[in-house]
Image (cartoon, rainbow, N blue to C red):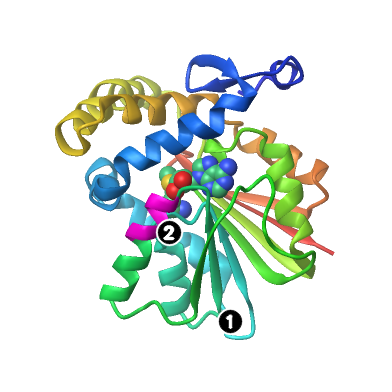
Amino acid sequence: MIDDRKIHDGLTDFGFTEIPVGEKATRVRGVFDSVAGSYDRMNDLMSLGVHRLWKDAFLDWAVPRASQRLLDVAGGTGDIAQRWRRRGGGPVTVCDINAEMIAVGRDRLQRAGGDAGVDWVVGDAERLPLADGSVERVTIAFGLRNVTRIDLALAEMRRVLRPGGRFLCLEFSKPTQPWLDPVYDAYSFKVLPWLGRVVAKDEAAYQYLAESIRRFPDQQDLAERMRRAGFEKVAWRNLSAGIAAIHSGWRF
Ligand SMILES: C[S@@+](CC[C@H](N)C(=O)[O-])C[C@H]1O[C@@H](n2cnc3c(N)ncnc32)[C@H](O)[C@@H]1O
């Protein structure tokens, strides 16, 4: 859970470590600089490919249309952008704070011949480099957890949406089945850091992943934060018994 009082005191969580608010973006950038090259492979390994099914469900809910422009925040290596375009969605801007992730993504989409209609911009979710009301859809997949002030990022993502536009967030969440907890904990705190060490050569980055998931708001809390940011018709769906969840909200 996020402790909002901490942010007022100039502190925030970086996984289970408490750090000054001003340091988080740099620390997060360091994590993704380090893992950019192995990021896609690690996603498949860690989730045994299940992240693909979650992203399919995410795109099912987004219902891409050629008439809609998408901003994919924290878009990393362009997975959501590529899927949006393949399903007939309009132009996409991928915005990510990390130039390294964007470089890997741009290269990957070019090689797959799927880079037409996708542009890339380095930028912070808390200060999006887009005009008010400039896109019909905003997505963020496995990104919000890494942002320092998520309420600010939610407000920014609403700001850039046109009235009538929709926001969708895919993120790890709180498992709904208590029997899952010990298995999930063992997997998160033993297997993930080990995989990080062996495959990505960065154990700490995957320890951070496991810890940041535990610190992220649960389904109800995130929905409430979205409403406070001004989103309407807020709803969510659990994926894999709540290990991940998709939240949706509209700007009217
Ligand atoms: C786990 S990756 C997700 C990438 C991609 N959305 C996906 O689903 O594969 C998280 C991404 O969030 C980016 N990120 C972290 N903090 C950010 C911020 N404040 N603003 C924009 N991007 C950020 C990281 O650079 C990284 O590329």
x and y percentages locating residue 235 in the rendered image: 68, 51
x and y percentages locating residue 49 in the rendered image: 27, 52
Residue labelled with disc 2: 55
Q: Residues within 10 Å of mark 2 (few under 14, many from 20)?
A: some
Which dot marks residue 22? none
Horizontally, residue 233 falls left or right of residue 87, namely: right
Residue labelled with disc 1: 65
Query: Residue drawn at (60%, 32%), measured in percent from left and top?
Result: 218
Residue 142 visible in image: no
Q: Does the segment drawn in magenta span residue 244?
A: no
Q: Is mark 2 within 8 Å of ligand 1?
A: yes
- The secondary element bearing badge 1 is classed as loop
Gap between marks 2 and 1, in whole Å?
17 Å
- Residue 137 placement: quadrant: bottom right
- The secondary element bearing badge 2 is classed as helix
Residue 95 drawn above or below residue 22? below
- 169 or 236, which is in the foreground? 169
Q: Earlier in the sequence, mark 2 or mark 1?
A: 2
**Quadrant location of the C terminus?**
bottom right
Q: Which residues are magenta?
A: 99-104
- 4 or 115, which is in the foreground? 115
- 60 or 197, which is in the foreground? 197
> Principal SS element in the magenta part?
helix
x and y percentages locating residue 136 in the rendered image: 69, 72
Looking at the picture, which amino acid does disc 1 mark? Answer: Arg
Q: Are marks 2 and 1 in contact (CB under 8 Å)?
A: no
